Image (cartoon, helix red, strand yellow):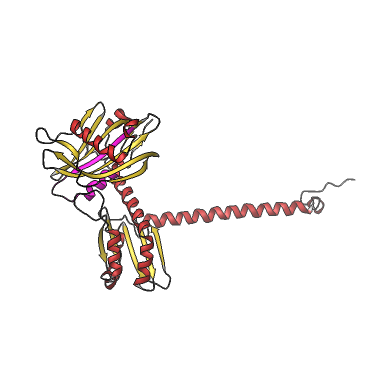
């Protein structure tokens, strides 16, 4: 009589080759490792999210930097070096203003709410000498630059070596913060899109004051003045020669035609007594010429700063010119020009 073996019988259990069980065991280990990795990743992510959730919102005015160091260092060559690097002149203004305003703090007071500044430069005595950038350490968004060294001389060296990087990092942090604030009350106007097929992110406080075939003027009132954006296009060959010589003549021609002054026969031109700054850059991935300088009104006594971007549209074979200028005779103009420049750098072409 043939005896049938059950599934748990010794004969059936050992009927498969040993290698099968080794392979199966290895697969189980791999699955377990993958599962463990996913669990750890999820756990770390949750911890990071929970930590981020409890980080307070950063505070402070735009273009302000908190500097933390002992008072004796602030009054020494280290403090002077920090002031020299972070308070470089903001380009293109008729009267010199610093790129950043500095708030000094003694390390003893750098606790609690004082740590919530959006841009912080912290000097500390340590046997390890280094320069380190961190994001959202005590608040968000926040850039924290930590400079350590055994003494002020070593700290000054590491600060000097990385000052350019620090300024660029703070500038981008401030640009993003300005765009975030603009996004709270953005314009719904489609004038630029309909006329030129472009988009700029600017606040709803700006309104279109002039719209012609190839010229748009947008304006926002400020205390005793106004901020302005103008947009127009040029033929491709208009800037085929030396840019620095041509763009100023073009500005004057546009100003005479479209931007009149307050007096009869007066109009918007470039102030030639102050040499403008010229750069080659990119906006929206397009080759761009940047000019910063001072405007004035012919036959009148009015002046102020401007920033001009000439953006090349190689497909349509033309230049899109976007310019911002401020008129605020009794006010500092750094933050006004920072706003206009930030708006222009949000440039996007809509195909």
- Residue 25 is left or right of residue 314, and the answer is right
**9, 112: nearer the viewer:** 112
Q: Which residue, as the protein is rendered here, is positioned at the far left?
A: 263
Check residue 97 for magenta coloring.
no
Check residue 320 for magenta coloring.
yes
Q: Residue at x 37, y 29 (%)?
A: 317
Q: In which quarter of the image is residue 343?
A: top left
Image quadrant holding the N terminus, namely top right
- Residue 283 is left or right of residue 80, and the answer is right
Q: Which residue is drawn at 14% across and 45% down?
A: 223
Vertical relation: 329 (above or below) 106: above
Q: Can residue 207 be seen in this view?
A: no
- Residue 25 is left or right of residue 136, and the answer is right
Q: Residue at x 82, y 52 (%)?
A: 11
**159, 314: nearer the viewer:** 314
Q: Which residue, as the protein is rendered here, is positioned at the far right?
A: 1
Q: Which residue is drawn at 14% across and 47% down?
A: 329
Vertical relation: 210 (above or below) 72: above
**Number of numbered discs present?**
0
Vertical relation: 314 (above or below) 176: above
**108, 149: nearer the viewer:** 149
Q: Quadrant of residue 226?
A: top left
Q: Magenta residues?
A: 319-341
Residue 320 rendering spot, x and y as whole percentages = 32, 34
Vertical relation: 285 (above or below) 38: above
Q: Is residue 2 visible?
A: yes
Residue 54 rendering spot, x and y as whole percentages = 36, 57
Residue 284 rendering spot, x and y as whole percentages = 38, 39
Residue 3 rendering spot, x and y as whole percentages = 86, 47
């Amino acid at each position: 009589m043939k005896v049938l073996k059950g599934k748990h019988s010794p004969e059936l259990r050992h009927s498969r080759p040993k290698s099968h069980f080794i392979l199966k065991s290895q697969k189980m280990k791999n699955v377990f490792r993958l599962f463990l990795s996913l669990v750890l990743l999820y756990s770390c992510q949750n911890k990071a999210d929970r930590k981020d959730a409890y980080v307070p919102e950063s505070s402070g005015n735009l273009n302000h930097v908190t500097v933390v160091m002992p008072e004796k260092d602030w009054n020494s060559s280290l403090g002077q070096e920090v002031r020299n690097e972070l308070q470089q002149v903001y380009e293109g203004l008729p009267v010199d203003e610093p790129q950043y305003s500095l708030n000094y703090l003694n390390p003893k007071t750098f606790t609690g709410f004082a740590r919530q500044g959006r841009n912080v430069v912290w000097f500390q005595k340590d046997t390890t000498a280094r320069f380190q950038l961190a994001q959202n350490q005590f608040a968000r968004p926040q850039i924290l630059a930590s400079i350590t060294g055994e003494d002020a001389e070593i700290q000054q060296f590491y600060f000097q070596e990385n000052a350019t990087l620090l300024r660029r990092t703070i500038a981008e942090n401030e640009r993003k913060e300005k765009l975030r604030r603009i996004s709270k009350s953005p314009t719904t106007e489609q004038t630029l899109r309909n006329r030129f097929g472009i988009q700029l992110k600017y606040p709803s406080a700006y309104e279109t004051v002039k719209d012609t075939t190839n010229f748009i003027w947008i304006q926002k009132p400020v205390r005793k003045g106004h901020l302005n954006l103008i947009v127009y296009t040029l033929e491709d060959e208009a800037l085929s020669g030396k840019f620095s010589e041509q763009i100023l003549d073009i500005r004057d021609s546009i100003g005479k035609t479209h931007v009149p002054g307050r007096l009869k026969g007066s109009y918007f031109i470039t102030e030639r007594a102050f040499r403008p700054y010229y750069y080659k850059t990119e906006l929206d991935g397009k080759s761009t010429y940047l000019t910063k300088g001072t405007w004035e009104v012919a036959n009148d006594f009015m002046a102020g700063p401007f920033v001009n971007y000439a953006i090349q549209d190689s497909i349509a074979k033309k230049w899109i010119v976007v310019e911002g200028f401020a008129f605020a005779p009794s006010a500092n103009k750094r933050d006004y020009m920072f706003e206009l420049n930030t708006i222009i750098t949000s440039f996007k072409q809509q195909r």
